[in-house]
Image (cartoon, rainbow, N blue to C red):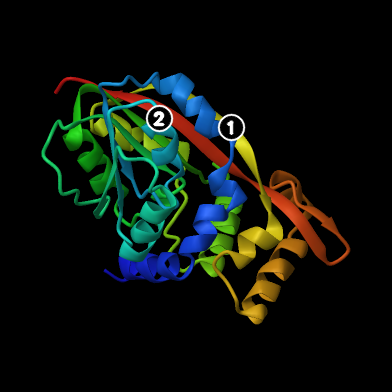
Amino acid sequence: MREKDDVKRVFSKNKEAYVTSSTHAFGKDLSLMINWLQPKSTMKVLDIATGGGHVAKHLANHVKQVVATDITEDMLENTALYLESHNNINYAVADAEDLPFEGENFDIVSCRIAAHHFPNPERFIAEVNRVLKPGGQFLLIDNIAPEAQKFDQFINSLEKMRDHSHVRSRSLIEWKKLFDDRNLSIIKEQTRKKVLPYHEWVQRTLDNDEIIQHIGQLILESDKETKSYFQVDSEEDTIHSFAIDEWMVMCAKRPD
């Protein structure tokens, strides 16, 4: 599938950037997820699309085993080197929409800042449901689309220009329907504005100056309402940062 090939190309090329990215490596959500999940030393965790391994690293200190997966082999190998001191993390190249694990095998499944790359979110959620133990917890953290179509189209178009592997940031309504269809009950949720340092964000996946300039122009030339919604911080022709919507949600698997 073309979208998944794009993911492999982008993340193979930028594997180091996702380990060091301030957006991925830090954030209150990493400590908050421990508070929400209350992981125990007997638990087995599956971290889907682990990227730079930040969730796997944090959870490994609290559970028996973490299985960190990613569709991009180069990314996973680099992350394994980065986390080599954690001897309870295992690694598996895996497609989030077709996981190579038996059913009802994990106490916790996590996926952070990755699902907007998945072309078939219904398959992803079906797989989460399948591999979770009854009563198990699912933690999703991802960029979400605003409910207003104007802002939805703006941010998704911008992300696609910056990163060909971006499929779509979906709305809360879309995600909640998928959860409900697959017996996942929301226990806790939180939305926030996530501030993105502009140059780090745009250069993480791009080295084409023409495209970078075009993206900057689109932001700077957007209307006042759009700049306000995305909290664009700029000075003359320089963009310092802007903010997108992010959702953190914890679900429990209901009995079938």
Residue 129 lies in quadrant? top left
Horizontal arrangement in the rendering, residue 179 relative to residue 22 (left or right): left
Which one is closest to the eye, mark 1 or mark 2? 2
Can you say which quadrant of the picture contains the C terminus? top left
The residue indicated by pointer 2 is 61
Task: Give me the residue at 35% from left, 65% from top.
Answer: 74
Closest to the observer: 124 or 49? 49
Q: Position of residue 212 (x, y in %)?
A: 66, 73
Frontmost residue, 140 versus 93:
93
Inspect the image, locate mark 2, and give the three-letter code of the amino acid beneath it: Asn
In the rendered view, does 103 fall on the left or right side of 86? Answer: left
**Residue density around tag 2, few if under 14, some if 14–19, many if 20 or more, within 10 Å:** some
Which residue is at the front of the view, 73 or 71?
A: 73
Residue lying at 43% horizontally and 64% vertically, measured from the top left: 11
Q: Tag 1, which secondary structure?
A: helix
Residue 45 found in image quarter: top left
What label does residue 53 carry, if any? none
* Disc 1 residue crowd, few under 14, some 14–19, many 20+, Cα 10 Å: few
Vertical comparison of 75 with 137: above or below: below
Residue beneath label 1, please? 28
Query: Quick one: which residue is furthest to the front in this view?
Result: 85
